[in-house]
Each structure stands twice: as structure tokens, then as C-alpha cells.
Image: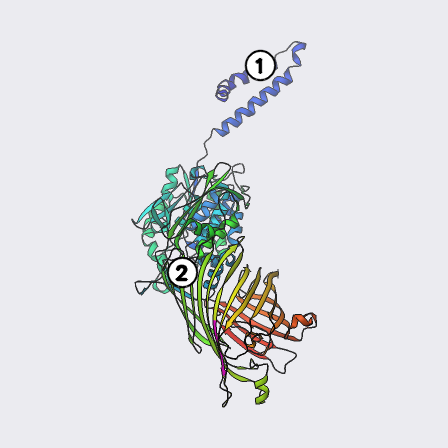
Amino acid sequence: MALATLKTFFPLYTISFFYIYSIPLKSGLKEFRPLFLLSFLLVFFTQNSFSQDTIPRKKIGLVLSGGGAKGFAHIGVLKVLEKAGVKIDYIGGTSMGAVVGGLYASGYNATQIDSIFEYTDFDELLKDYIPRTSKSFYEKRNDELYALTLPFNNFKIGVPIALSKGLYNYNLLAKLTNKVRHIRDFNKLPIPFVCIATDIEKGEEVILNSGYLAQAMMASSAFPSLFSPIEIDGKILIDGGVTNNYPVEELRKMGAEIIIGVDVQDDLKDRNNLNEATRILVQITNLDMIVKMKSKIELTDIYIKPDVADYGIISFSEGENIIKKGEEATLAKIDEINKLGTPNNGQPSRFVKFEIAELNLKNLEINKLENYTRAYILGKLRFKAGDKLTYKKLENGINTLNATQNFSRINYSLNPAENGDTLRINLVENETKTFLKFGLHYDDLYKSALLINFTQKKLLFKNDVFSFDLGLGDNIRYNLDYYIDNGFYWSFGIKSWYNSFNRNSAIDFKNGIILNQLGIDKLNIDFSDFTNQAYVQTVFIQKYLIGAGIEHKHLKIETTTIESGESVFENSDYLSLFGHLKYDSFDNKYFPKSGWLLYGDFKTFLFSSNYTRDFNQFSITKGEISFAYTLFKNFTMKVQTEAGFKIGNKSVDFFNFVLGGYGYNTINYFKHFYGYDYLSVSANSFIKSNFTFDYELFKKNHINFSANYANLEDGLFRTGNWLSKPKLSGYALGYGLETIVGPIEVKYSWSPELPKGYLWVSAGFWF
């Protein structure tokens, strides 16, 4: 009102000023002339400023289409717009356009978004990567054994609904939108925002302008077959590109008067370019949208079409080049764009500092489940209401739930609570309870094998899982595991396994008596181990696995080298009690770059059928500590120390520690040792250290050098010889490749104590 009045009377004020300033004034009034001049100038500039502000600036809307990795071009467009000083008032996007647009609307500038995408591992995103540290001990073994997992319902093999549940992406977006996590009306974001998803059941577009921002962005970008659908308000949503890949109309409705549109979707491709499954899917989803784009372009004032035809929707490795394509296409329209930008209104400095906030978790809400208890869920999450919660801990908990494969959909949101947050988790139980899994492996001990697994969940009780492995190949093997997972409480299980192999051995399990009698260096050994366990275990302080149980073992060792006389060395049953403690934070079992492993085991043998007539009660204890550390980019050091000894006046030689070989799944007290062949040396106590230096030459390709040293003899820790200079040493130079079926490794190993070296090959996950 005051400014309006000032504007009305300003002409009169001006005339009065010049009149008063020109007439002679009495000397007593002359001193007020400077003051009057100052007041006039103030009024003048206020009027001038007001006049400028009353000129309405047209509201600018930015629409970003979907296109998968081609959406990187949006970042290049934003960079040019920021440099031109263009203020964006509204943002609408679909799919990748929703992701980039949502981040920009939440306060990030183009450079920040560029950095976010630069440091995102899109291979992990597509595979729904679950960090190994987030998995339980059972799930670590499960995921490091099988190359292929398929649903098995009603005796029919199915296929997964999608390659990924999208939780890796969801966790990332939830963390990135931390600053606006409590905003539920997208019009109240730093820049008003809208995105589009598709109701897969009705085939209708769904406008998302409210809710949990990270969830909306995920729903809009849930590309069919790559990511699982997202449930919001009872609707099953997929990629919005199916119904509306360019929401220009929604920006007009929001109030945008000028539309800048960025279109990165494909035109129709001919048969020669439809040579990938993703390209065919994109063509199908684009059929309707390409027709609609003609009318949508007419609603666009500045239409930007980056040249990204040579890239696919998963060309994430080409992100830098795609961003440049966006910049180039925008610069081609720079004359039109410069008309919209002003130095005062531009936003090149808009900045949201990325901080990993600590959440004050006041409440934890979990939807009611049919087959899983709240204790089970809390046991996987490893946090509860009242905890101080970092996003890292939140991610680990959600990832642990995901690793169980018990839930087909996992959604969560952070909602405001008094002096903190309420975490609301919505879980949808996986209807598939039966799985077939497959693996392959070769090593120089067990030879080749095909692994077939049958897994049944909820077989007898809630939270239980039954698993049976059958290894078919040169040596028949099996592993049976039944486990009831009670989360925070004690869990129960039974195990049964059978291993067998045939090998020329430098030990005869008789302290060399038979080898000396025959005057030979090696025996051909048939070794078989049949073991059954019943156990209980729990997780201590959310890190350490503590377990105990009872074990039955039947051990048979025989040779075909002896043509006459006793060819069976051992054929006894044993009963024992055991306990163990384990901690494992390695990020990768085979090629770790970080983490620790601690392991301790104690077993006391109480009874034997005593085939050899020399059994006395005895105990065995062993332990291991190892760590991995990345010294500099792609160069990692792993240090490992192991030790073990027997307790008792007399023990069974068949349970001695045996050193030699590499690349096989260890059983009983067999230990890898570079430089020595399989089954080379044995004694009832040992200490061993190993140092490995690994360099990732390029992604998933490793060259490494290892050195190990050991002392091994009967009563090693009683004599004090374990402190003496190592008597055994060995070295290995190797190459390793990470593949979908597991690691493929080739190592040449040698020892200065032996006349020749060994070439070892292993392929596939160890089993």
C-alpha cells in the first residue's frame, strides 16, 4: 500500500522538489537542502526499483523425458541453463528425467548431480547389489555358491519378475533426498516438481506430485524387467514412460508459461538396430509415445533433442559422453535461452550440501506379516526404536532384509515425529517359497562338478529354510541344511554333508609308516567324510556369530596302492561337541578390498567306534584372524594368520592339520598352502601366515602375488618351536577373473624347499 501511494504521488513530489530547490531560501533553511536531496534520491530509486519488480517474469517450466542412461544428457542441459542464468520455476520428468529432475528440485545443482552419477556404480544398481557386510552368515554362504537362481512353483521353473528390486537405487535416493525427507507436497520443494508413473494393472498414467519423494522417483523409473514394480497407495506402478514420457501438459497446469523440453527418448529403430532385449522393450514402450510427441512438441517453447541415438538405456559407462551431448544440444539453442536468463535471477550458485545425517529414530512401524515375526524383522534390521540411526545403518538393515529373498517388495519412508523420525517399513512377502539353484566348479582336488540345489522356505515353521545341495561330477558330494532363523533370539539348525575325493598323497595318516614300508613317496588315497550336526546359534552385539552343537562324523580312508594286506586305514564313527565364534566383514570372499575376519573353533571328541583301536578322548582348537586393506587405488593387501593344536595325551592322526594346495573347499583340518602340493605335510599343531598383494588391472580382472610361511609339527606349542624361524615357505603368482559363475583363478606356486613348482586352476564358487 505504501509503495502504491508513493507511486501515485511521485510526479507531484518531483515538481515540488525542483520548485523548492530553485527558489531562494532563508539562510536558516538552506542547510536542509542536502537532506531534501537525499530523500528525493531515495524515493527516486525506490520508485525505479518498484517499477522494475512490477514487470512480471514469465514462469519457466523444465520437462525431462525418460530414456535410461541417455537421461545423463539432462545434466548437460542443466549445466548450460545454469550458466545462462535461467531460473527454473517448475520441473516435470519421467523415468530418468524424474530422477534427475527430482534431485534438481530438491536443491542440488547440475555439478552436484554430475558428481553423484559419476560415483554411482550402475552395475551394482542394476543387479540390486547387496553389500556382503549386510548379509547374515547363512546368506553369505548362500550367495557365494550359486551362479543361477530360479523360482520353482508347482513343479514348474519360472523366471524372476525383474533383474532387480531396485533397493540399491531406493537407498541411494532416500539418502540423497534427506534434506527434504519430511516434505510430502512436491509443490513445497525448493522447485515444485511432478513425475509420472504407470498403473500396470489399469494401464493408466499416475501423476505423482505428493508423497515420499524417493519412492515417487523410483516408481517413475521402474523400467519393466529391470526393476520390480513399486506399490504406492495400493497401486502397482512401473516406469511412467509407458504412458507419458514427456509430461509437458502437467507443467502447463502447474503454471509454467514458458516450457523448456528435453527429449532423449528413441525414435523407432529398424530391424538392424533391434539387436538387444532392452532395445526391443524400449521400442515397444515408445510406440505410442512417438506418435504423441508431435503434439507435445507444439506445447514446448524451446525443444532440445540431444543426439543420443548411438547409446542404449543401460549405457551408463558412457555417462560423460552423454552429458556432453546434452550440453551441445542446449548450446545450439543458446540464443533463445539467453533471452530467459538474467544475472540476478539465475541459479548457478544453488547448493544443497550433502550430509549423512544421523536420524533420531523415535518410532519403528512394520506392517503385519503372515509368516514372519516382528522379532525376525528386528533381528535382520539390527536396530530398533529409540536408536540413533545413520543412513549407513539404515541401508545395512534394509539390505539384510533384502538378502533373505523372503520379500518381493520392500518400501520404507521417513516421516516426521516429535524431535525425530518415524520409520515406516512396508514388506510384501515373497509368494515363491521354492527355488532351484545351480553352480559349477573345478579344482585340482575335487575335480569338476555340477551343483544342483533345492531350497524350500517355510517348510515346517515360520522363518525356516531347507536347502539341499547335490554335486555331480568326478566326486559325488552333498550338503543338507535346515535352519530356523529367530532373529534376535537363539536360532536352531541341522546340517549334513558328504565329501569325497581321490588323490595321490604324500602323507599316509600313519606318521609315514606305510610309505616307509613300501619305499614310495605317495599313496593313492580314497577319502570320504560323512558328517551330521545339530546346533544353536545367535548374533552377539549385532556382529559376532556364536554357535554350539553336537556332531557325528564317519571317516573312511583307504588306498588302492596296497595290493595285499590292510588297505583301509580308517573306518570309524566319531561323536563330538563343538563351539565357535565368527566375525566376517570382508566386502568380497575371494578378492576382498576391505574388512576383517575373526574365527575361533573348539571341538572335543567324546566317543569313537574305534576302528584302529587307538582312540582316546581329545580336543582340537583352531583360530584365524585376517584383514584386507586397500593401500591405494585398485591395490589391496590381505594379511592372514592361522593356528591350531590338539589337546590330549594322544590324538587320532586322521584329524591332523594338513597343509598344501589351493582353490578347494576345505574340510576338517585341511589348509591351503602355496608351494606345496595337496596333502603334502601334516602334524597335530601348526601356525601359518599369508600375505597377498592384489592389483585389479581392470574391472574384475586381478593379478596377485602371495607368500605364506608356517611351522608345523606335533606338540608345536609345547616345545616353543612356533616362535622359531618358519620351516615351510611358499609363493604364488596368479591371475583371477570375477565371473557370474564365480572366480576363475590360475596360480603358479613354488617353494624354495622343493625342486618343482605347481600350476593350479580353479573355476567357479568353491563347494
Element assignment for label 2: strand
Q: Which residue, given by chain and number where applicable, does mark 1 sit on? A: 19
Q: Residue 636's image quarter?
A: bottom right
**Residue 597 appears in view:** yes
Q: Amino acid at mark 2?
A: Val
Secondary structure, magenta segment, majority class: strand
Does residue 41 appear to the left or right of 480 in the view shown? right
Q: Nearer the viewer, residue 378 or 148?
A: 378
Tag in front: 1 or 2: 2
Q: Which residue, given by chain and number where applicable, does mark 2 sit on?
A: 465
Nearer the observer, 675 or 103: 675
| Residue 616 falls within the magenta-colored stretch | no
Q: Residue furthest right?
A: 724
Q: Is residue 222 visible?
A: no
Q: Position of residue 132 (x, y in %)?
A: 50, 59
Position of residue 74 measured from the top left corner of the image (x, y, whole percent):
46, 49
Residue plotted at (41% across, 52% down): 264
* On screen, residue 140 above or below 477: above
Give the magenta range: 553-558
Name the residue at 34% across, 54% down: 286
Q: Amino acid at mark 1?
A: Tyr
State the SS at label 1.
helix
Q: Position of residue 519 (x, y in %)?
A: 59, 89
Q: Position of residue 298 (x, y in %)?
A: 36, 44
Would you call the spot at circle 2 few (<14 residues within 10 Å), some (14-19), or many (20 or more)?
many
| Disc number for residue 558 | none
Q: Could you tell which of marks 1 and 2 lies nearer the N-terminus?
A: 1
Q: Which residue appears farthest toward the bottom when viewing the image? A: 564
